[in-house]
Image: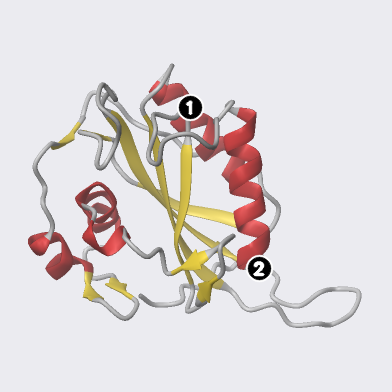
Amino acid sequence: MTETPNPNIVDADSLTGEMHPIRRVVVALGSNLGERLSSLQGAVDALADTPDFYVTGVSPVYETEPVDSPDGAGPYLNAVLLADTTLPAARLMERALAIEDAYERERGGDRNAPRTLDIDLIVVGDRRSNEDFLRLPHPRAHERAFVLQPWHDLEPDAVFPDRGPIADLLLAADSTGVKRRDDLSLEVE
């Protein structure tokens, strides 16, 4: 994936002169509880309102069967958002968690339990992290059609770091249960 500078981003602190790298960010959104589309739109709006975070694209919405979820979990609505930012990855993760909390995301319990909102940082520029709080690039996204397909819709020539072109990864992923919902859409204001 390329670093795509956004002309609206000032890449030097006006007070200190400190340079901040511009990073391309891929964010996956999902919801399978409550008002699913409303939760996704709320996440897009909240991320777009984040200082120094410039949304450059939002994918079509997909309805997907839950993966590795407890029995009885309902289908997800999923989308991918692209942005340019100078924010550090840890601050982006803190913002994502705060937005999830605002949508009453419950943590703990079963792994991959149903959720009102899930925001995953997939790629943050060329940043690598293997901390419990933040793993970059996302360790399973390269296998997940519900991430790869909407990302491919936005950037068909994108490359997943250390894994290869997302078009090739998408061909290898199980796309069963991943359906585009052209009757639903997300907007960036």
Residue placed farthest to the front in the image?
Answer: 109
* Image spot of residue 30 (x, y percent): 39, 37
Figure quadrant of the C terminus: top right
Q: Is residue 41 left or right of residue 185?
A: right
> Which residue is drawn at the image coordinates 35% and 75% (left, top)?
1
Judge by depth and name the residue closer to the eye, 134 or 17. 134
Would residue 8 be seen by someone viewing this image from the given angle?
A: no
- Residue located beneath label 1 in the image: 39
Instruction: Give the secondary structure at mark 2.
Output: loop
Q: Is residue 179 left or right of residue 160?
A: left
Judge by depth and name the residue closer to the eye, 80 or 138. 138
- Residue located beneath label 2 in the image: 88
Lower position in the chain sequence, tag 2 or tag 1: 1
* Image spot of residue 40 (x, y percent): 45, 32
Q: Amino acid at mark 2?
A: Pro
Judge by depth and name the residue closer to the eye, 44 or 146. 146
Instruction: Give the secondary structure at mark 1.
Output: helix
* Image spot of residue 55 (x, y percent): 51, 52
- With respect to residue 103, does 130 lie above or below? below
- With respect to residue 3, does 73 lie above or below? above
Q: How is the image coloured?
A: secondary structure
